[in-house]
Image (cartoon, coloured by chain):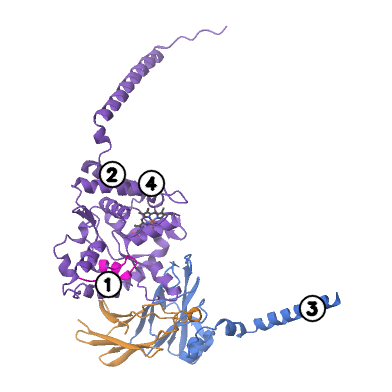
Chain colours: A purple, B orange, C blue
Amino acid sequence: MIPRRRQSPTQSAALTWNLTGLISKAIAFVSLVLAEWVFSANVYAVSSMQEIEQDQIEFRQFFQSRFPDLDLEDYRQGASALPQFSRQRSGHQILLSMPPYETVVKDAQLLWKQPMASGATLSECFSGKPPPTAYPFLFQGEIHTIESDINNCLVQNGNPVLSSEDEKLATLVAAYKSPFRGQPIDIDIRDENVRALYDEGKQYFWAKRGQMNLSCANCHVHNAGNQLRGDVLSSALGHGAGYPAFSIRQFSLSETEGQSNQASGMQTLHQRYQQCNVIAGAAPLPSQSATYLALELYQAIMNAGLPIDAPGLRQ
Amino acid sequence: MYPTRLKILPRDTGIEAHCEVLHPMYSGKHSEEGGPSANYITQLVFRLNGSIHAEFFLGKFVSKHPVIGTFFENATSGDQIEVSWQDISGNQGQASGTVE
Amino acid sequence: MLNKRRFLQKSTRWFALGTLVSLLPGVRTAFASRNFVDPRPEFASIDTKLILEFYFGQTEAADDATIQINAPLVSGSTQLVPFSIIAPGAEKLVVTSTVNPQPLILAMDQIRETTAVVKARARMQQTGDIVCYVLRNGQIGRASRRIMISGHWENN
């Protein structure tokens, strides 16, 4: 006959503890549901400034533990900052000693002082505007990027707009940003509408899409530093700080297409987003579309405090 | 026709000079398929105070928007550095600068 | 039946002959290079010896560790491969690659320095070496660096 097991005192204590645990969990659950009902307006509200700051901290902690040797400001250099870039680094360094973007950007700096149809110059248009470190910003319900402000200025002064595919636009932006190299990104997030756009961009960044069912984060957070077809995947922290950038790839591809061989290789951030969408098998959106603008804003806010480093040199 | 820029970079032991030309350096590789016909820089000369310092001969395997850099050990402040080039279509260009 | 056999024999013979002819040096390049040929023989040459003969008047080269070549281990692009060369005592300098249809990339002459310094960016069609030849005191020195081209990009 099997002897009946006596319950040990510790076991019965555990049981009572479990019971109280269960009850307190139930109470917590009920009160959560209640709170959600009472504050239902707030549950779906935009992120608060504290929440955004928390996002920033978590984001940075992730990369800090993934790349312990990097300082925050190193991330502005994109993939070339990462230890996995070591085999390409020597070439990168030699190229930087004779930067392939320098002459085009210098020439574009002259364009900023050239009178448009109305006689005004681009520099005059921008004299009252915030510095490039504060872009993108929300003003009168619209997100302003340097690209959109250049085009607004051109139209107001009787000139045709530049298409987003026109390298001249990327070069003009690079020329505007380059004197500010090294200054920290500083986006104003006090406006609730800005934070709503932040949420939209964040949602786009983390959502999976396309034939391969990949989110931006899959490549640039979870796989940052890994190789993809010979490219080192950059970390999402720092995205945009080096843009517009000189893309060696764009410079080289145009070389073999015969016709438009004069491409300087300058690329805007939104053109990079489009490329990323394409390699992940998702439909690219138009440059300066609402979604890309929100995405750019989200990435800029995550970069707060990082120095801008445009134009950058990219593979 | 093609913008030319000379960059003078002071170094510990002398002066480094870079010449960049926004030249397409068409190799002519795609001329059969309607691409542009060959046109690239064939000769590029650096002069120090008017006399030839280094002469480069280039071919179609030099990249588009070529940068050619070289060194001047004995250049001193006030010296004039000039660079000039020509391509196979007869275009020419030059740039110059003074050592600071 | 007989005709068919003769046809097969004949065509095989012609095929074999064609293959043999195409193996002769120069024939294939002549057909392949319908594109532009550089009018300067040293740049059109597929033979490094001819290039050395042209610039240095001799062809015997020996490895020389004093020539420093700085170049990327890996380049993502075939179109923008940067390199820099420091060659003490060089009177003339020639830079070639082992992988382009014609080896000569650039040559440097009339060097008014005790040390020749060259920085440039080259096209390299695939993984291979950059080889630098230098004339010094009537001798040719040689140094090379391997560059891996990882150009996985379309149309490269």
In this figure, which residue is indicated by the disc labeled 3? C7
Q: Amino acid at mark 2?
A: Asp
Q: Amino acid at mark 3?
A: Phe
Answer whether residue A162 is magenta in the image.
Answer: yes
- Say which of A86 and A225 sits in front: A225
Q: Amino acid at mark 4?
A: Ala
| Label drawn at residue A55 | 2
Badge 2: how crowded within 10 Å, few (<14), some, or many (20+)? Answer: some
x, y percent for residue B29: 48, 79
Task: Identify the subunit bearing mark 3.
Answer: C
Q: Are marks 2 and 3 in contact (CB under 8 Å)?
A: no
Circle nearer the N terminus (1, 2): 2
| Label drawn at residue A105 | 1
x, y percent for residue C45: 52, 86
Task: Identify the subunit bearing mark 2.
Answer: A
Q: Does residue B35 lie above or below A300 as drawn?
A: below
Q: Are marks 4 and 1 in contact (CB under 8 Å)?
A: no
